[in-house]
Image (tube, helix red, strand yellow):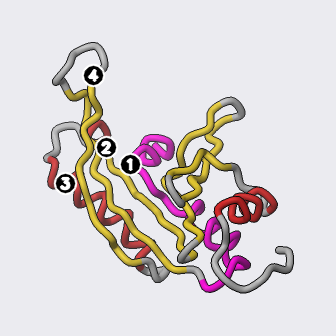
Amino acid sequence: MSERTNGPLALDELKRLIRSAGYQMYGTRAQEVLLAERVRDNLILDSGISVSPDPLTIHVTVRAQMLHFPGQSLDECRAFAERLGQAFLALGYERKGAQEVSIPDMNNAGVALDTVCEVSLEKPLPSPEAIPGAIQKALALPRTSAELEENS
């Protein structure tokens, strides 16, 4: 990483640091850089990982989708998302919340195609130099129930 002055990072500086470390961005949301995950050569997805510059923090959202739990309850799906989060808690992340998100059917108003159970976690980073290692560790851990199907 390059030399920089003390104080909070600007969003543009954070983007440059992430790009120079070799990671792709999916987008930005307010003061957060969303990281991409290249699934295949032509398919880039939101990784569920983001970094905020002030305070310097890495955020992870783990997800369990009901579609991956046929015949099981929403509680079992929630429990799976919580289990995915355990690996991040072991790395010093703090659980910030959980929610269920409905995936709407765009062709049928008011109809949900599926439900995703999410758990949000975050961890403060001590310095910009810690960004690449934190991203690498987060990308190495399972973050979605879809990874069950990929490994089946």
Highlighted magenta segment, given as a residue range = 126-152
Q: CA distance from mark 3 to mark 2?
A: 11 Å
Q: Which mark is residue 145?
A: 1
Q: Are marks 2 and 4 in contact (CB under 8 Å)?
A: no
> Residue 44 at what x, y percent from top left?
62, 38
> Residue 146 at what x, y percent from top left?
43, 43
Q: CA distance from mark 3 to mark 1?
A: 12 Å
Mark nearest the camera among 3 and 4 is: 4
Type of the residue with mark 2: Gln
Residue 145 covered by magenta stretch: yes
Type of the residue with mark 1: Ser
For the residue labelled by badge 2, is the local secondary structure a helix, a strand or a loop?
Answer: strand
Q: Is the residue marked by circle 3 packed among few (<14), some (14-19), or many (20+) residues within 10 Å? A: some
The residue identified by callout 4 is: 105
Which badge, 4 or 1, comes first in the chain's sequence?
Answer: 4
Q: Which mark is residue 76?
A: 3
Residue at 61% in and 40% down: 39
Q: Are marks 4 and 1 in contact (CB under 8 Å)?
A: no
Identify the image quadrant of the C terminus.
top left
